Amino acid sequence: MANALAVAAKLAIALVECQGLWPATGLHAKKPRIRMNTHFSRIALVGKVEDARVADSLALLARHLRARELTVILDRAAAIEGLPEGLVRKAVGELGQDADLIVAIGGDGTLLFAAQLALARDIPLIGVNRGRLGFLTDVLPDEMIANVDDVLAGRYQTDRRRLLQSRLVPADGAGRAYLALNDVVVQRQESGRMVELEVWIDGGFVNTHGGDGLVIATSTGSTAYALSCGGPIIHPALGAVVIAPISPHTLSDRPIVLGRDSRIEIRLVARSGTRAQVTCDGAVLGELAADSRLEIGPAEQDITLLHPPGHDYFRLLRSKLHWGRSARSGSEEV
């Protein structure tokens, strides 16, 4: 009981610190925002140029950056109109090799892809929203040029996000690993059949989940797939992890919030006779077989997002989730 109360107290203190309501001192002191590099000169642009809106924004930004005599790095396969001269063309997988800043233009899926390019050299990311919701791509198209100029001038907020490391370990022990910013998803492959998954946390058995699968999400990913599964919204500064069942067979099978350093193991129940697939931020990691296991834990690396001045996480939630809007007028109520 005492341990449970202590954990609850720590989570409560961390939450009010995130909202600026608690004096940040001692062990609970809020980490200062770190300015990584206030002079960016080599900028990679990432986006699905098949979308005309993305292509237009990408070409506009490329022209602006070249007019400032900055190096602009672009996918060599991107064929769009209105691009300036003097671009550095690379294979899409090499865009992060020489860049010191990546601008992802599109939806959150584009930023998740760009995050994989940024990991090797810890390159900061800016997200320009040309998708639907855009919890990660928070720069509006109309404000793109002004916000990028702010970043180039050193006016920005640095946001370090925790990652999950997932490792799919087959019977022979030769596992495949992947880093996820949003979530790791284990879901059934056959339609119409329930999958049964055993969950172990920090070496202890928790439960056998029956249903369509599980979403293991970071705090960042709590507003993605896990939210549609009934999971909570977790402030990114908490760095917590949520396990959210997908269409659980049992109504009492509810989402669980874990500490940031928890280690999770998922196994497929052999008797279920089903197959399960593992994806990380939408990328397929492989198949979870009855003789294999999926290990998920905290990654050693973080990812860095850059926000324009005045960025407000709760204002972002109000905008994307339409909180406080009148049903009659559609206007936001303050």
Image (spheres, helix red, strand yellow):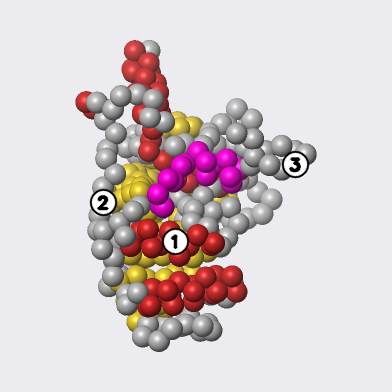
Report whether residue 12 is seen. yes
Q: Nearer the viewer, mark 3 or mark 2?
A: 3
Which one is in front, 321 or 210?
321
The disc at residue 146 is: 1
Q: Identify the secondary structure beneath mark 2.
A: loop
Q: Residue furthest bottom?
A: 85
Give the residue type at disc 3: Ser
Please state if 103 lies on the left or on the right of 314 as rendered: left
The segment highlighted magenta reads: 307-321
Which residue position is annotated with label 3? 329
**Tag 2–tag 1 contact (CB < 8 Å):** no
Q: Quadrant of residue 130?
A: bottom right
Which one is in front, 110 or 171?
110
Q: Quadrant of residue 218?
A: top left
Of mark 3 and mark 1, the one earlier in the sequence is 1
Give the residue type at disc 2: Arg
Please state if 225 lies on the left or on the right of 173 as rendered: right
